């Protein structure tokens, strides 16, 4: 197992290097002058001032020189300085990341709390009206764009009913929780329908297995067969796929944070793109990529624990 984990960690190095390189190239390929954008937001700059700022930020250097400097900084744990705020990128990311983490985890909890019981009930009530209602709900969840659903929630619960805030975070703990509800529900819709259908399918497949029929033949109670024999085996493939879908939640968080004005890492990265804040964009994308890679690594480790043949691949 140690060799398997070590081998996978070594493979992460070229992946992280490739992500950092591609992000650097793509953000510099976007047209626009960050100094001019800064000047538009603050005041008109003289050519001398503009030249001095560009020189201090290293923007006058050739692109290969900027690339080497950026990669050298990354190797030393330095993501550079934000062009817009002039503060360390690592500080801005560390300040925003907890909000994105809370939003993503709360959405995942909503998925687990709703999708797992709903999928199980749908499988146990196969081909009944309960099953049809559950599958209709799952189909709506899969088909509905999350950002559109979020806007509908804002209109109903924020503007018409006035129950929940629609933008930003509150200052107190209660206001923070209230402001977290709508974006969490919206983000959970990305996986809610998919996971519900997966739990149902997996449960139906397990209920047809020989060991389940044997358990019934022994005269065991339905509740014991469901929770002792069927459920643990049905949830194994669902949990592995669910961990792999974590990347979808992170990607969706970028959009949802922008819709609800949630001050997380996704919103920071989107704003940085509009400002041509090169260092913040590359830093934000790199952090998202590393998180996805690490989650996939944990997923592979989980797979290898279930099936030892994976360690030989």
Image (cartoon, rainbow, N blue to C red):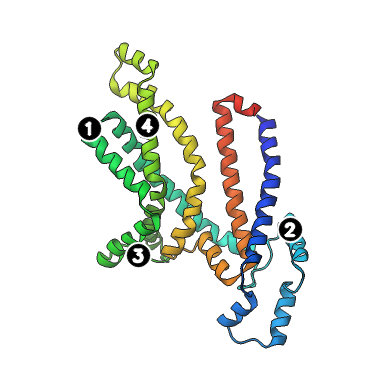
Residue found 57% across the figure and 67% down from its top: 273
The answer to whether residue 169 is left or right of residue 310 is: left
Instruction: Name the disc covering residue 71, or none.
Output: 2
The answer to whether residue 139 is left or right of residue 101 is: left
- The residue where tag 3 is placed is 165
Task: Check disc 2 and report its element: helix, strand or loop.
Answer: helix
Most distant residue in the top direction: 218
**Looking at the image, is mark 2 or mark 4 earlier in the sequence?**
2
**Looking at the image, is mark 2 or mark 3 earlier in the sequence?**
2
Structural distance between the alpha carbons of marks 3 and 4: 37 Å
**Looking at the image, is mark 3 or mark 4 earlier in the sequence?**
3
Task: Check disc 1 and report its element: helix, strand or loop.
Answer: loop
Most distant residue in the left direction: 129
Please tell me whether mark 1 or mark 3 is closer to you in this view.
1
Res. 162 image quadrant: bottom left
- The residue where tag 1 is placed is 128
Task: Check disc 4 and report its element: helix, strand or loop.
Answer: helix
Q: Is residue 22 above or below residue 108?
A: below
**Looking at the image, is mark 1 or mark 3 earlier in the sequence?**
1
Residue found 36% across the figure and 40% down from its top: 115
Structural distance between the alpha carbons of marks 1 and 3: 39 Å
Q: Position of residue 234 (x, y in %)?
A: 41, 28
Please tell me whether mark 2 or mark 3 is closer to you in this view.
2
Please tell me whether mark 3 or mark 4 is closer to you in this view.
4
- The residue where tag 4 is placed is 201
Please tell me whether mark 1 or mark 2 is closer to you in this view.
1
Q: Nearer the viewer, residue 271 or 231?
A: 271
- Label 2 CA crowd tier, 10 Å (few <14, some 14–19, many 20+): some
């Amino acid at each position: 197992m140690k060799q398997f984990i070590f081998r996978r960690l070594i493979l992460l190095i070229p992946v992280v290097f490739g992500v950092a390189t591609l992000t650097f190239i793509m953000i510099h390929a976007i047209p626009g002058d960050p100094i001019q954008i800064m000047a538009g937001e603050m005041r008109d700059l003289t050519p001398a001032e503009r030249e001095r700022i560009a020189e201090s930020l290293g923007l006058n250097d050739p692109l290969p020189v900027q690339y080497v400097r950026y990669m050298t900084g990354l190797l030393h744990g330095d993501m550079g300085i934000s062009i817009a705020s002039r503060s360390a990128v690592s500080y801005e990311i560390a300040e925003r990341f907890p909000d994105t983490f809370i939003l993503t985890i709360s959405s995942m909890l909503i998925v687990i709390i709703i999708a797992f019981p709903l999928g199980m009930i749908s499988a146990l009530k196969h081909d009944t009206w309960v099953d049809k209602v559950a599958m209709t709900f799952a189909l709506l969840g899969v088909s509905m764009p999350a950002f559109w659903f979020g806007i509908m929630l804002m209109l109903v619960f924020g503007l018409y009913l006035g129950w929940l805030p629609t933008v930003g975070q509150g200052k107190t703990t209660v206001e923070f929780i209230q402001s977290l509800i709508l974006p969490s529900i919206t983000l959970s819709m990305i996986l809610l329908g998919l996971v519900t259908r997966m739990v149902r399918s997996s449960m139906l497949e397990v209920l047809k297995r020989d060991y389940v029929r044997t358990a019934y033949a022994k005269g065991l109670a339905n509740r014991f067969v469901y929770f002792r024999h069927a459920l643990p085996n049905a949830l194994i493939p669902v949990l592995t796929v669910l961990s792999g879908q974590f990347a979808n939640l992170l990607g969706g968080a970028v959009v949802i944070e922008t819709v609800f004005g949630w001050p997380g890492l996704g919103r920071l990265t989107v704003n940085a793109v509009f400002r041509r804040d090169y260092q913040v964009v590359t830093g934000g994308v790199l952090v998202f990529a590393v998180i996805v890679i690490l989650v996939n690594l944990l997923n592979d480790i989980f797979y290898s624990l279930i099936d030892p043949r994976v360690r030989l691949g």
